[in-house]
Amino acid sequence: MTMRQLPGTVPVSAILTEETFDVADALARFSVSAKGAGAIVSFQGITRPETKGGEPLDRLVLEWHPRLTEISLHQIAQAGADRFAARAVTVVHRCGVILSGETIVLVAVAGDHRRDAFLAADYLMDRLKTDAVFWKREEGAFGSRWIEPTQRDQHDRTRWNHDQSQN
């Protein structure tokens, strides 16, 4: 028998930080909240060394509104937990100055089975790329320029718009 959590009753954590963080430590802490899970899936996003156009990238700057950004991260994390009946979800997202090569985001999902955990992590990343409240700027020898979610990001986001029962 599969145990299903009621929406909003699972441990959901959304952390916004300007500091670098230890991914292994965050995952170890997360696994404690994943009691009874049959699967834990995680995704670690790292700031690339180049822009999409191939120019060397020194850093990303993610500007944020403390309250609005925190709310958006928590709502996205909760939506993923509810939609995929996760046992636990955590999102750790950097803001401020993020150097090339540094971790920008960690998503971890605990579920009864691997398929739902993978789907939930994928869903969360698609939502974070398009719906989290950040203003992103890339900086390098080319100067500084604002960036928006790409058409691919938007396309990836729309694939989740179908009825939940089809997951």
Image (cartoon, grey):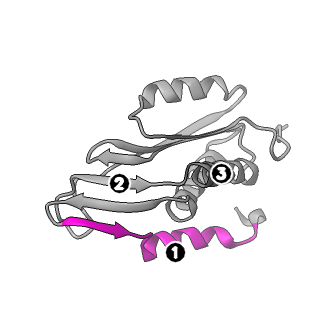
Closest to the observer, 118 or 26 = 26
At x 27%, y 44%, the residue is 101
Q: Give percent across and percent down for residue 123.
A: 59, 57
Structural distance between the alpha carbons of marks 1 and 3: 24 Å
Considering only order in the chain, which callout, 3 or 2, is on the residue closer to the N terminus?
2
Q: Is residue 166 above or below residue 22?
A: below
Mark 3 residue element: helix
Q: Which mark is residue 155?
A: 1
The amino acid at mark 2 is Val
The amino acid at mark 1 is His
Q: Give percent across and percent down for residue 34.
A: 67, 29
Going by the image, does 26 lie left or right of 52? right
Q: Is residue 73 above or below residue 50?
A: above
The reply to whether callout 1 and callout 3 are in contact (CB within 8 Å) is no
- What span is colored magenta in the figure? 143-163
Mark 1 residue element: helix
* Residue with the mark numbered 3: 71
Structural distance between the alpha carbons of marks 2 and 3: 20 Å
Going by the image, does 55 lie left or right of 155? left
Mark 1: few/some/many CA within 10 Å (<14, 14-19, 20+): few
Q: Give percent across and percent down for residue 88.
A: 68, 37
**Of marks 1 and 3, the one in the foreground:** 3
The amino acid at mark 3 is Ile
Q: Which mark is residue 61?
A: 2
